[in-house]
Image (cartoon, rainbow, N blue to C red):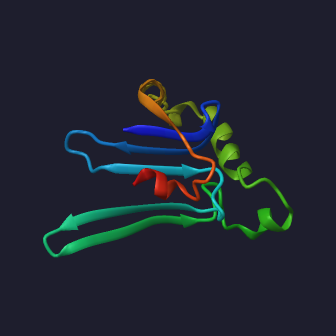
Amino acid sequence: MSRTFGLFEDEIEKWSAVFTGSGLPECMVLVDTKATISKFHVEQIINTIDGKITTIFADLNDPFDSGLEVFQKDNIDQRVPILNKLCRSLWQEEENEYEWYDATITLWKAIEANTKFEQLSTNSPTLDSELR
C-alpha cells in the first residue's frame, strides 16, 4: 500500500508506504517533507511471543549524515562522500554490480502506478492523524 498526501496532487507533502513480500518482513516507510525535525531512522521490529525486539540500524539527522566533522566544518554538501564513492565505482568494472538497478526502477514504477493520493485538510496538524 502506498499513499501520498498533500493539499494538491502535484504538491505532495507526505508519503506513506508498506512493502510486503512472501517470506519477507513487512517494511513501513514514512516521508514527511514538512516535519518539524529532520530525522532518518531505520529500525527492525520483530514480534515474538514475549513481546517486541527492536534493532536500530540508523538514527541520523538525514540519510546523508556522514558524521564526519570535516564536511560539517567546511560547509560541504553531505551528499558529496556518497556521490564520490558512487562515481569512483563506475570506473572499476570488476566492482560494478548494478543488476539491481533494473529491479529498483521496476519496483518504483509499480509503486507510482499503485499510489493513491489523499488530500490533506488545511487544519491537519500531522500525518499521524490522517493515517488513523
How many numbered markers are drawn?
0
Q: Is residue 62 left or right of residue 101?
A: right
The percent coordinates of residue 30 (x first, y second) are: 49, 51
In the displayed structure, 114 sits above or below 31; it is: above
Seen from the viewer's position, the closer of residues 46 and 119 is 119
Q: Quadrant of the C terminus?
A: bottom left
Which residue lies at the image location 75% right of the left edge and 70% below the top edge? 69
Residue 123 screen position, x and y as percent: 61, 53
Q: Quadrant of the N terminus?
A: top left
Residue 64 position (above or below residue 8): below
Q: Residue furthest bottom?
A: 50
The image shows residue 17 at horizontal and vertical percentages of: 42, 43
Residue 98 is situated, as x and y percent measured from the top left of the image, at: 49, 31
Q: Residue at x 46, y 39 (%)?
A: 3
Question: From this viewpoint, which residue is outermost toward the right?
Answer: 74
Residue at (46%, 46%) from the top-left corner?
16
Q: Is residue 46 left or right of residue 6?
A: left
* Residue that appears at 45% across and 49% down: 29
Residue 14 against residue 39 in the figure, above or below: above
Q: Report the side of 53 relative to 41 (left or right).
A: left
Picture quadrant where residue 110 is located: top left
Q: Residue 116 versus residue 107: which sits nearer the camera?
A: 116
